[in-house]
Image (tube, rainbow, N blue to C red):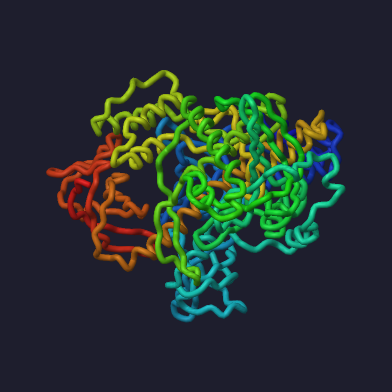
Amino acid sequence: MQAKQKILDLLKKDGLAVKGLDNLFYFISKTYSINIEEVKQDFNKLLNNGYIYEERKGKFIAIPSKDYVRGTFIGNAKGFGFCKIDNSEEEDIFIPANMTNNAIDGDKVIVKILSKNQESAEGKVVKIYKEIVLVSGVVEKIGGNYFLVPDNNHIPFKIKIIKGKSLFEENDRVVVKLVRGNIFSGTVNEILGKNDDVKACELSIIRDYQLYEVFSDDVLKEARKIPQTITDEQKRGRLDLTDKIIFTIDGEDAKDLDDAVSIEKTEDGYILGVHIADVGEYVKYDSALDEEAYNRGTSVYFPTSVLPMLPKELSNGICSLNENVERLTLSCIMKIDNNGNVKSHEIKESFIKSVARLNYTNVYKVLCGEKADEKTEKVSSQLILMNELSQIIENKEKEEGCLDFEIGEVQFVFDENGMAVDFEKRERNDAHKLIENFMILANKTVAKDFCDKDIPFVYRVHEAPRKEKVINVLEYLKGLNYKTPSLPEIITPGYYQELIKLSTNSDITETINKVILRSMQKARYSNQCLGHFGLALKYYCHFTSPIRRYPDLTIHRIIKESLHKKITGQRVDELETFTFEAGEQSSLTEKNAEKCERDVDDLWKAYLMKDKIGEEFEGIITSVTNFGVFVELKNTVEGLIKIEDLPDDGFLLFEKQLKLKGQKMCFSVGDKVIVKLTSANIYTRKIDFSFVKFSNI
């Protein structure tokens, strides 16, 4: 690991020309006293992951640098494409059809920028450093040959299937392993089911995002060697918290319980303990488990299943804080005054024994003064105290500018056979907020601790919105007759809080919140502490979910090294490189997981709506485009009214005002309408409406 930063430092300015790589390896090895085999290994990793590019024979440059960027290729049915620059808010780079270098949608590429102005950039793909290997779709027979019709409509061609041992049939949904050449072909890697089977459709989406539930034999072998009980040797030197009243609060179906809480009342405030599974004790640097966790980056959650970041032996076993068993933890213990200020804290390696595995439903009953189950009642006094502190913390956060968007998430209801039968907005009550507030406080406390120590770390960063985006929001709000505050020189969370408050308790609060949310930058991971705009925090990280997020696991191991005073000299440089890579990779895998989760949710929504064709619904316009308007129903379903189906003609799109104006009618984001469901397609996951009338709901 230590050679990586040295290599990148050498290449960052103007690149490096060498006669033979062995000379470069020898130079780095001798100059920095690093084993030459490690230099070779790290160099090849950087090359294979797109951080280094051989610009011409023997001339290597670091990426990004000069006119080169790395990113994801976004295909188009017409043959051209775009490059989405990794972890950047910059506009996508246009790639003409003759400059794609045969890249297909999803490939990881290095692009040379050929021209650029304020509005657009054009480039060419010079290298595909990570190819899409698996493509899902439906088998079609043409003559005596079989072809895959990709589900991904950004792949503009059919893929010839090379016959093998798989007994597939026409109209089967399958996954094909690509063989690249002048013509793309492939062999069937997996048969998912029939074309019209909704669960096969779900698997097809998951595979298109290159996600799998199975782990390699090497990873499973390593996981199965880990004992499922903790030893006296592991306890030695740790803080013993087994005599404390500590418990977990999660959803009723959760199996990976990675956070537990405890509380005590003091004369001048509270002692809050946030105890997190010590996954770093089991997943060591450069192990098979670590490499797998790095590649996956996150657990991915679907209505019917979870694709875990770590095998169940860890995620549901020794790393899960199950009740009445001892578990290793990292504890952030905070002394908090009556105003919600953390006056002091300590971060310790510890071990706990959870007294109860609680769920949000029963905890909320206690908080409402209702009767709950026996084990929740036993800790009711602690829960009441926690809720008291939670509300103090929440009020303090709001005073400091923390943004709380009222946006509903979908929750599916399934029968005993695992089929979706209904869906609704997910409930978020005081029990959920309690855990959220405690986790945020722990994340903030840990981030400040390590930023102050100037130790390489992975932070959760959320930068301020760009001014042009804020101006668009103001124009939209003015179009709704809201009197908006003047635009300040520096955009602050407090200013955004003022915008959110304008529509509080309105019928279109959620819609306005979505417009405001879209104007903000995406949160990401970085080894620089850049603050979190949405939470109005100067310091923030993700510390509380190491079972399901790689950044949390990364900083857990750094915390443990720091506690044992192992971060000195050369190790600082190594961690600087590693935290940068971990932040970049985790941001990419998070985006991939979120997109996949959304697509799967849309599939199940379409599946449940297809029996309601012809029915009328109340909804709100959430977006306007030059091809129609999008309407969201109360159950979170969103569909399109195509422009040709609107009862008017001669439409003009006023993009900044979020209006679509016809000769007689005007459709604006936030308008309430009655629509009729005309189509619900599980293959495209698209839902279409027809306009009935404006509504006065």
Q: Residue at x 49, y 41 (%)?
A: 123
Front position in the image: 686 or 121? 686
Q: Position of residue 390 (x, y in %)?
A: 54, 35
- Left or right, 579 with respect to 127, comes to right
Front position in the image: 476 or 398? 398
Question: Image quarter for residue 660?
Answer: top left
Relative vertical location of residue 484 with respect to residue 672 in this rendering, above or below: above
Q: Is residue 408 visible?
A: yes
The image quadrant where one finds the N terminus is: top right
Q: Position of residue 466 (x, y in %)?
A: 43, 29
The number of discs equals 0
- Left or right, 424 with respect to 556, comes to left
Q: Position of residue 120 (x, y in %)?
A: 42, 36
- Left or right, 160 with respect to 684, comes to right
Question: Image quarter for residue 268?
Answer: top right
Q: Position of residue 469 (x, y in %)?
A: 39, 31
Q: Residue at x 38, y 40 (%)?
A: 514
- Left or right, 382 with respect to 34, comes to left
Q: Is residue 182 visible?
A: no
Front position in the image: 437 or 93? 437
What residue occupies the far top of the structure in this picture? Answer: 489
Q: Residue at x 39, y 65 (%)?
A: 607
Front position in the image: 492 or 372? 372
Relative vertical location of residue 470 with respect to residue 545 in this rendering, above or below: above
Relative vertical location of residue 686 with respect to residue 401 in this rendering, above or below: below
